[in-house]
Image (cartoon, rainbow, N blue to C red):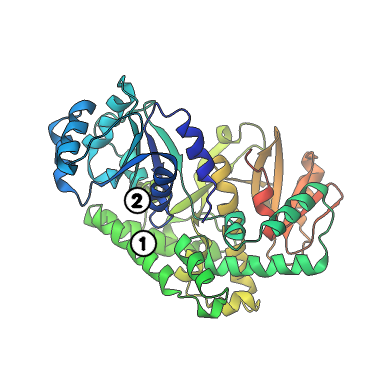
């Protein structure tokens, strides 16, 4: 399946001096994407799993000199590595800190070594690197679950994508049958989420969602919880799990600003903040900060004590919440569908800037603030067709933004300086070039 990160990998291929590190949560497709990239773009390719190939992992404990490392790998693999036309993929690199350190010396080598690497919880490893992380010597790219556009590409809906983009730019409504088709696909995406294994399973079952194996999502969540205990001290693993499992309850509150007391009635920031940081670094969750000024740069005005937390995949949120897929497809649970919708929008917006912001003023709240072409644009999210909102109207009266965006199930349109964006077109907002 096509992933947008492939374009970034192709750019790296043309200027590969620095090793490339692909960071992302488990099951987002890091290994598959890098393997396909290596096979399709280089004459020779060597795959090394440092978690399983302990004999090679030991080499890095003995030396971090690139030439010596390559020489020993050649002996173990019984092969010849020509730096000019060979790429080496170091998978599960997080298990060997010395291997990460060696990337600095591969970067500085006069030989044109081509190294890519990935690993589960690599973001956590980077965050808690005990020695000196090779800053400026590694190209770091992030992989997230498949967004809605990638999902449509996987379904072969290229013509629909083009139609959505065209109408996003023109603000002219789509023909109703096409609009309804896109909404139906969006509802199914809320159920499936963007994990490649889920979308593959949907496709292999002839797009029949009732035949989808939802145990895949349960297994991914189980693997996440297992990682929390495997790669942390026992007490921190428990706190990580508590925060992760509390997210549906956090988001379902009217004021869904994160509260440690929802995790545990006796919880305090000082005890749980390191666990929250671990989950953020793992890319399992996303953070949306409260900015106290709607001015650029939004990051400069963040209130460090007020924020929201979303799961990095809307399908996992549905599964973690034990919400039946039929409740979404048949609109039986409007309240929690609103929770899923907000989480979905967060997942669509975050990868473009690696940050999310919301805004409070007087007694009102704006769901998201984004910077588009230099302007701060307010975004309001609605899960259905009812789009009346005092918050957005009051924001417009008070701040007079260049324009505003309202996301809902309504068709494209532009009225009273508000751009109406259907939920299936969120991927078009602030689209990266």
Res 211 visible: yes
Where residue 275 appears, x then y in whole percent? Answer: 34, 51
From the image, tell me which residue sits under label 1: 242
How many tags in the picture? 2
**Classed neighbour count for the residue bearing mark 1: other residues with Cα under 10 Å, few (<14), some (14–19), many (≥20):** some
Identify the mark nearer the N-term, 2 or 1: 1
Where residue 287 appears, x then y in whole percent? Answer: 50, 48
* Cβ atoms under marks 2 and 1 closer than 8 Å: yes
The one of 313 and 164 positioned closer to us in this rendering: 164
The one of 302 and 113 positioned closer to us in this rendering: 113
Q: Is residue 185 left or right of residue 273?
A: right
Quarter of image, res 326:
bottom right
> Disc 2 versus disc 1: distance between alpha carbons?
9 Å
Q: Is residue 286 left or right of residue 372?
A: left
Determine the secondary structure under disc 2. helix
Where residue 7 appears, x then y in whole percent? Answer: 54, 41
The one of 327 and 290 positioned closer to us in this rendering: 327
The residue shown at (65%, 42%) is: 370
The residue shown at (56%, 58%) is: 343
From the image, tell me which residue sits under label 2: 275
């Amino acid at each position: 399946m096509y992933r947008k990160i492939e374009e970034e990998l192709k750019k790296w291929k043309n200027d590969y001096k620095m090793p490339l590190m692909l960071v992302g949560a488990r099951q987002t497709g890091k290994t598959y994407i890098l393997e396909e990239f290596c096979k399709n773009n280089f004459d020779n390719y060597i795959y090394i799993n440092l978690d399983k190939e302990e004999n090679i992992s030991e080499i890095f404990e003995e030396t971090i000199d690139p030439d010596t490392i390559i020489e020993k790998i050649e002996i173990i693999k019984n092969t010849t590595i020509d730096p000019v036309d060979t790429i080496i993929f170091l998978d599960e690199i997080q298990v060997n800190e010395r291997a990460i350190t060696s990337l600095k010396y591969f970067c500085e080598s006069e030989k044109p070594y081509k190294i890519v690497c990935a690993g589960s919880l690599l973001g956590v490893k980077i965050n808690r690197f005990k020695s000196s992380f090779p800053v400026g010597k590694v190209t770091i790219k992030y992989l997230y679950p498949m967004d809605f556009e990638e999902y449509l590409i996987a379904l072969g809906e290229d013509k629909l994508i083009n139609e959505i983009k065209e109408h996003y730019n023109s603000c002219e409504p789509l023909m109703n049958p096409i609009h309804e088709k896109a909404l139906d696909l969006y509802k199914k995406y809320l159920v499936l989420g963007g994990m490649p294994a889920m979308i593959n399973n949907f496709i292999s079952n002839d797009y029949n969602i009732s035949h989808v194996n939802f145990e895949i999502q349960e297994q991914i969540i189980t693997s996440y919880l297992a990682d929390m205990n495997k790669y942390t001290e026992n007490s921190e693993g428990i706190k990580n799990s508590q925060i992760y499992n509390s997210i549906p309850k956090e988001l379902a509150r009217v004021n869904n600003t994160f509260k440690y007391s929802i995790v545990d009635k006796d919880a305090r920031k000082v005890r749980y903040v390191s666990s929250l940081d671990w989950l953020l670094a793992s890319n399992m969750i996303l953070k949306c900060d409260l900015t106290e000024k709607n001015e650029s740069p939004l990051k400069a005005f963040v209130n460090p004590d007020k924020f929201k937390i979303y799961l990095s995949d809307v399908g996992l949120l549905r599964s973690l919440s034990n919400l039946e897929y039929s409740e979404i497809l048949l609109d039986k649970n409007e309240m929690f569908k609103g929770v899923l919708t907000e989480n979905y929008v967060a997942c669509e917006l975050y990868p473009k800037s690696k940050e999310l912001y919301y805004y409070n003023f007087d007694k009102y709240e704006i769901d998201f603030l984004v910077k588009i072409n230099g302007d701060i644009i307010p975004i309001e999210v609605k899960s259905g067709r009812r789009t009346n909102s005092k918050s957005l109207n009051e924001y417009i009266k008070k701040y007079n933004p260049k324009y505003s965006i309202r996301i809902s199930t309504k068709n494209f349109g532009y009225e009273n300086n508000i751009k109406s964006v259907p939920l299936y077109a969120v991927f078009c907002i602030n689209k990266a070039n």
